[in-house]
Amino acid sequence: VIASIRHVNLVALIGYCIATTPLEGHQRMIICELMKNGSLHDHLFESKSSSKLSWPIRQKVALGTARGLAYLHTGAQHTIIHRDIKAQNILLDETFEAKVADFGLAKSNTEGATHMSTRVAGTWGYLAPEYALYGQLTERSDVYSYGVLLLELLSGRKALIRVDAGDGLDTSQPC
């Protein structure tokens, strides 16, 4: 999918190769442009402070991600549904321009189809209810995931918080 599309807010494919190593065996690798600032997830959840992401940068990331999704849904030759929009899959270049990445789960939708019925794939917490429950995949599935991403971007908190039953917390209450 990534080889057939070009947009400023999508990670560009530079090349690919297949290699065989004694330790790992047969490996397929894709080579994409370097994203010097890592992922949005790194800045929101992995760094000691998310102060690097000022409000103007957060707005730039939100708009860049939206432009990338809009291109996938309406600008590409066939509608492409990403299926895994989340902070780890939004990469940031040296100027904090957002680029949608990881098209491993993407599906191309034929024109005129209202939805695709498919096996559910993606990350729990980001899946649209109609997709998670019934396998009905539409552009709205990506839009729902984008909304969850926006909540993370605005709040600085993860969409899902894993709670272990043995840590003394009441797991019956939502986080």
Image: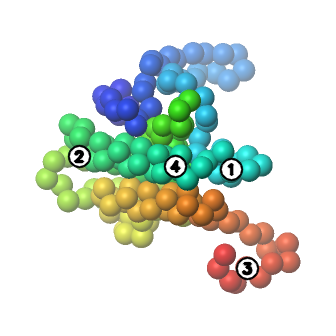
Q: Nearer the viewer, residue 166 or 20?
A: 166
Residue pictured at 40% horizontal, 35% vertical? 10
Residue bearing the label numbered 1: 51
Q: Choose the circle earlier in sequence order: 2 or 3.
A: 2
What SS does tag 3 mark?
loop
Is the Cβ of the residue at disc 4 closer than 8 Å to that at disc 1?
A: no
Q: Choose the circle earlier in sequence order: 2 or 4.
A: 4
Residue bearing the label numbered 4: 56
Residue pictured at 34% horizontal, 32% vertical? 7
- Determine the CA span between mark 4 and mark 1: 12 Å
Is residue 133 depicted above or below 9 in this figure? Answer: below
Is residue 103 depicted above or below 19 in this figure? Answer: below
Q: Is residue 4 visible?
A: yes
Is the Cβ of the residue at disc 2 closer than 8 Å to that at disc 4?
A: no
Disc 4 residue type (three-letter): Pro
What SS does tag 2 mark?
helix
Q: Is residue 55 left or right of residue 50?
A: left
- Determine the CA span between mark 1 and mark 3: 31 Å
**Closer to us: mark 2 or mark 3?**
2
Residue bearing the label numbered 3: 171
Residue bearing the label numbered 2: 74
- Determine the CA span between mark 1 and mark 2: 34 Å
Q: Quadrant of residue 135?
A: bottom left
Residue 168 shows which numbered tag? none
| Residue 24 x, y percent position in the rendering | 68, 23
Q: Is residue 40 left or right of residue 2?
A: right
- Determine the CA span between mark 4 and mark 3: 36 Å
